[in-house]
């Protein structure tokens, strides 16, 4: 984690998301899987991460990241 922070420190990193799949987990929750690539100083770095996150739709219709 510290290495990642040092790599991005002082730069303008951009995250690029590519949605793979969204699966309902309950009436108001979904599990989303997506790839993330990173761009630093207008150049893509050779790192691709797979994320699996759970989101819940709140009463105000906004999505909240659960974990």
Image (cartoon, rainbow, N blue to C red):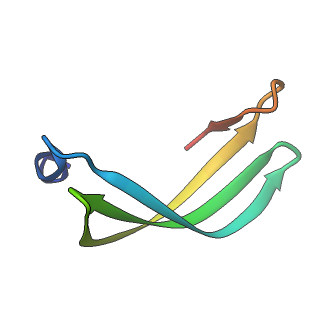
Number of marks drawn = 0
**Residue 46 at what x, y percent from top left?**
24, 75
Q: Residue at x 13, y 53 (%)?
A: 7
Q: Is residue 52 above or below residue 20?
A: above
> In which quadrant of the rendered view does residue 61 lie?
top right
**Residue 21 at what x, y percent from top left?**
68, 70
Q: Is residue 33 above or below residue 12?
A: below
Q: Residue at x 77, y 46 (%)?
A: 29
Q: Residue at x 25, y 46 (%)?
A: 12
Q: Is residue 34 above or below residue 13?
A: below
**Residue 19 at what x, y percent from top left?**
61, 67
Q: Is residue 8 above or below residue 51?
A: above
> In which quadrant of the rendered view does residue 15 lie?
bottom left
- In the displayed image of the protein, which residue is found farthest to the front? 42
- In the displayed image of the protein, which residue is found farthest to the top? 60
> In which quadrant of the rendered view does residue 47 lie?
bottom left
Q: Quadrant of the C terminus?
A: top right
Q: Residue at x 57, y 53 (%)?
A: 53
**Residue 58 at what x, y percent from top left?**
77, 30
Q: Is residue 17 left or right of residue 8?
A: right
Depth order, front residue of 1/7: 7
């Amino acid at each position: 984690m510290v290495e990642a922070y040092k790599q991005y420190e002082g730069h303008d990193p951009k995250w690029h998301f590519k949605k793979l799949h969204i699966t309902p987990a309950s009436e108001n929750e979904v599990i989303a899987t997506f790839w993330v690539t990173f761009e630093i100083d207008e150049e893509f770095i050779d790192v691709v991460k797979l994320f699996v996150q759970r989101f819940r739709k709140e009463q105000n219709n906004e999505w909240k990241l659960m974990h």
